[in-house]
Image (cartoon, helix red, strand yellow):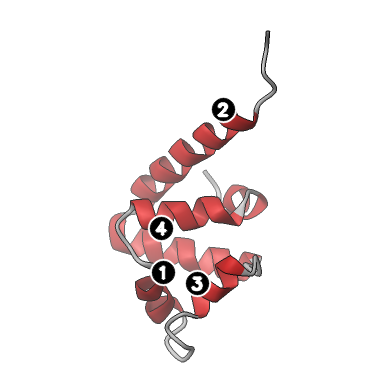
């Protein structure tokens, strides 16, 4: 999976991926944005202001910590679940 696919999808899927991998938003925020407030990333997610450059930084950080295949696998699971829930129902 490419980062562009993650950028094009819902930001809350990235947030759920962070949480499922065992990280907190504060921990990721301190590592990705060391000069900002510790709740900087949490605020961006709650106000839906996640930009593509934020997504790239977050994915790069997670990939360094747990490995790119793990991040991709967890994100893909959430994306599949999201698509299954939001797909048109067949009767």
Mark 1–mark 2 distance (CA, rounded to whole Å): 26 Å
Please give the label number shown on residue 25: 1
Residue 22, located in which quarter of the rendered image?
A: bottom left
Q: Is residue 78 above or below residue 41?
A: above
- Residue at left offset 43%, top offset 76%: 29
Residue named by callout 2:
84
Q: Earlier in the sequence, mark 3 or mark 2?
A: 3
Q: Are marks 2 and 4 in contact (CB under 8 Å)?
A: no
Q: Is residue 33 above or below residue 16?
A: below
Residue named by callout 4:
18
Position of the C terminus by quadrant = top right
Q: Earlier in the sequence, mark 4 or mark 3?
A: 4
Say whether residue 14 is left or right of residue 21.
right
Mark 1–mark 3 distance (CA, rounded to whole Å): 6 Å
Q: Are marks 1 and 3 in contact (CB under 8 Å)?
A: yes
Q: Earlier in the sequence, mark 2 or mark 4?
A: 4
Residue 71 image position (x, y, % from top left): 39, 50
- Residue at left offset 40%, top offset 41%: 73
Q: Earlier in the sequence, mark 4 or mark 1?
A: 4
Q: Are marks 3 and 2 in contact (CB under 8 Å)?
A: no
């Amino acid at each position: 999976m490419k980062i562009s696919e993650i950028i094009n999808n819902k930001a809350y899927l990235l947030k759920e991926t962070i949480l499922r991998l065992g990280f907190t938003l504060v921990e990721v925020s301190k590592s990705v944005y060391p000069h900002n407030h510790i709740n900087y990333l949490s605020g961006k997610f709650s106000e839906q202001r996640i930009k593509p450059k934020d997504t790239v930084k977050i994915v790069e950080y997670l990939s360094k910590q747990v490995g790119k295949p793990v991040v991709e696998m967890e994100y893909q699971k959430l994306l599949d679940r999201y698509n299954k829930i939001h797909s048109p129902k067949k009767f």
